[in-house]
Image (cartoon, rainbow, N blue to C red):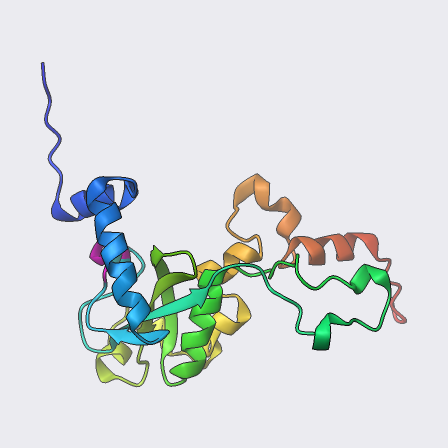
Amino acid sequence: KVTFIKMGAYKYLEELWRKKQSDVIRFLLRVRAWEYRQLPKICRVTKPTRTDKAHRLGYKAKEGFVIYRVAVRRGGRKRPNHKGIVFGKPKHAGINHLKFHRNLQSVAEERIGRRAGNLRVLNSYWVNSDATYKYFEVILVDVQHTVIRNDPKINWLCNPVHKHRECRGLTSAGRKSRGLRKSGHRANALKGSSTSANWKRRNNLSLRRYR
């Protein structure tokens, strides 16, 4: 007996993007990568390239929602010392084989967050990559817009506590580098905002004056 599973349009899109080595997606990515290279590093797009992914991350096709595509140069972080000279101990003399702690996706969010200061970063997702760049689309929200302020599903973002959340590691990509994607018993070592803060608290004796 053959059973057929009914799939909606978004499910088809999801399955297509899941198989990135398929002929269709490889061709699309190659053509789009060429197009993206001709455009500025930060550019506004009229609609999301991955509709299903954008909607899963909170995007709505209505006033107040904006999509920007950001290109971030791939690779590690070279230490910016003049002529590569570090006037210190040999331990700190490394220039080239260093890695930036945060991922490139959170760097993309930060760059557009600085460029579009009046918008709030909601989330972002990968769209393409070539040998030099990774391309991410970032969902931004105009919190001054009446439609956004009146929508109970998104107006939490209007609170001033969410200003430049992308710079403080509060978006999904930012939380990943902080090690906060885990939950339950696996997150016991994260109590107190991070593994390092947790370790520091457990390994430092604090004798307060009035106790």
Q: How many marks?
A: 0
Name the foreground residue: 152 vs 79: 79
Q: Name the residue: 12% across, 44% down.
A: 8
Judging depth in this view, the residue of 50 and 29 nearest the camera is 29
| Closer-to-camera residue (139/156) | 139
Which quadrant of the structure image shows residue 16? top left
Q: Which residues are magenta?
A: 49-53
Q: Is residue 33 above or below residue 23?
A: below
In the image, residue 199 sits, relative to residue 157, either above or below, namely above
- Name which quarter of the figure residue 21 lies in: top left
Describe residue 116's horizontal placement relative to residue 30 as left or right: right
Q: Residue 22: x percent and y percent?
A: 24, 39
What residue is at 36 percent from the left and 63 percent from the top? 136
x, y percentage for residue 67?
28, 71
Classify residue 36 as left or right of residue 80. left
Q: Residue at x 51, y 59 (%)?
A: 175
Q: Quadrant of the N terminus?
A: top left
Q: Assess whether residue 125 is covered by the magenta stretch.
A: no
Q: Quadrant of the C terminus?
A: bottom right
Q: Position of residue 161 (x, y in %)?
A: 48, 77
Foreground pick, 145 / 39: 39
